[in-house]
Image (cartoon, rainbow, N blue to C red):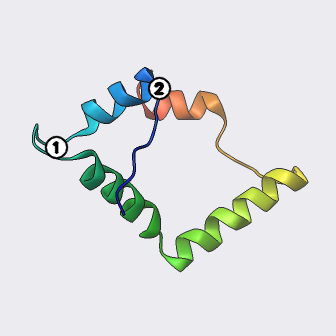
Amino acid sequence: MVTTIQVSEDLLGKLQSMKMHAKESYEELIWDLIEDRMELSEETKKSIAEYEEEVKKGTFKGIPFEQVKKRLGM
């Protein structure tokens, strides 16, 4: 079954800019995006869940913003 989906002009523009080549179909592009999300390893998923829990509890100890700027040479 083939169907049509409706997207905003902003999203259409973003999708167009993400195409690897002019003849790439939107279906190919969407499948690639879905595949990228599915490729997270179990270890990565676990780490993300742990960080989310720390943030919820207020115990997350990230890198101070000033250190991030320094590392990036800003």
Which element type, helix, strand or loop, lies under badge 1? loop
Q: Name the mark on residue 20.
A: 1
Q: Which residue is mark 2?
A: 8
**How many residues crowd mark 2 within 10 Å: few (<14), some (14–19), many (20+)?**
few
Farthest right residue in view = 57
> Residue 32, percent across and down?
31, 57
Identify whether 29 is placed above or below 72. below
Q: Residue at x 10, y 37 (%)?
A: 22
**Sequence order check, earlier mark of 1 and 2:** 2
Q: Left or right: 60 with respect to 68?
A: right
Name the residue nearer the viewer: 38 or 69: 38
Q: Residue at x 71, y 59 (%)?
A: 51
Q: Residue at x 25, y 55 (%)?
A: 28
Farthest bottom residue in view = 42
Q: Left or right: 39 with respect to 28?
A: right
Name the residue nearer the viewer: 63 or 15: 15
